[in-house]
Image (tube, rainbow, N blue to C red):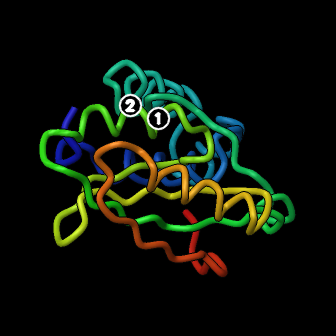
Amino acid sequence: MNISTLGPKDRALLSILSENARAPVAEIARRLGLSRTTVQAKIERLERDGVIAGYGVRLSDAYESGMVRAHVLITIAPKTLARITTELHAISAVRTLHSVSGSFDLIAVVEAASIAELDHLIDRIGAIDGVERTLSSIILSTRIRR
């Protein structure tokens, strides 16, 4: 399914689920002005069509505030993307990895329990064969989360 084929109620449903994937269908139906049956059918269709790929856990602000997170911008050697992606995927502290345009090739969002662990993690990323350069920015706070 293409995002452009989603109707306004589908997009509103996805927004509600992204806020709280455990919201009762009755509550979602009330917020959307639809019947429970219609909402349940929409959720099942979105799952079947692959728009909803799964459900996850949103960690509390208290837990997250104890973690040190950073963006690590990575420049890599030519023809090393697949291997480096595999190596970064094996590091559980790498929470997301994005291919980007510009002077860097990748941006990894990483998290650690302390500055010392973050320092070690960034060194570990920089030591991967084919990583030519890294630049890190520690995330001080999150202003918007959806």
Instruction: Specify whether 15 is left or right of 81.
Output: right
Residue at 25% from the left image edge and 66% from the top image edge: 104
Q: Quadrant of the C terminus?
A: bottom right
What separation in Å lies between label 2 and label 1 (alpha carbons)?
5 Å
x, y percent for residue 4: 17, 48
Residue at 80% from the left image edge and 57% from the top image edge: 60
Relative depth, front residue between 60 and 5 = 60
Tag 2 and tag 1, C-beta contact below 8 Å: yes
x, y percent for residue 98: 34, 53
Q: Give the total number of marks visible in the rendering.
A: 2
Q: Which residue is mark 1?
A: 89
Residue at 52% from the left image edge and 29% from the top image edge: 54
Q: Given the image, on which type of amino acid does mark 2 rest? A: Thr
**Quadrant of the rendered image containing residue 63:** bottom right
Relative depth, front residue between 69 and 120 = 120
Residue at 38% from the left image edge and 44% from the top image edge: 10
x, y percent for residue 133: 33, 65
Q: Given the image, on which type of amino acid does mark 1 rest? A: His
**Quadrant of the rendered image containing residue 55:** top right
Instruction: Say which mark, if any, is on residue 86.
Output: 2
Instruction: Specify whether 35 is left or right of 23.
Output: left
Q: Is residue 137 above or below residue 28?
A: below
> In terms of secondary structure, where does tag 2 sit?
helix
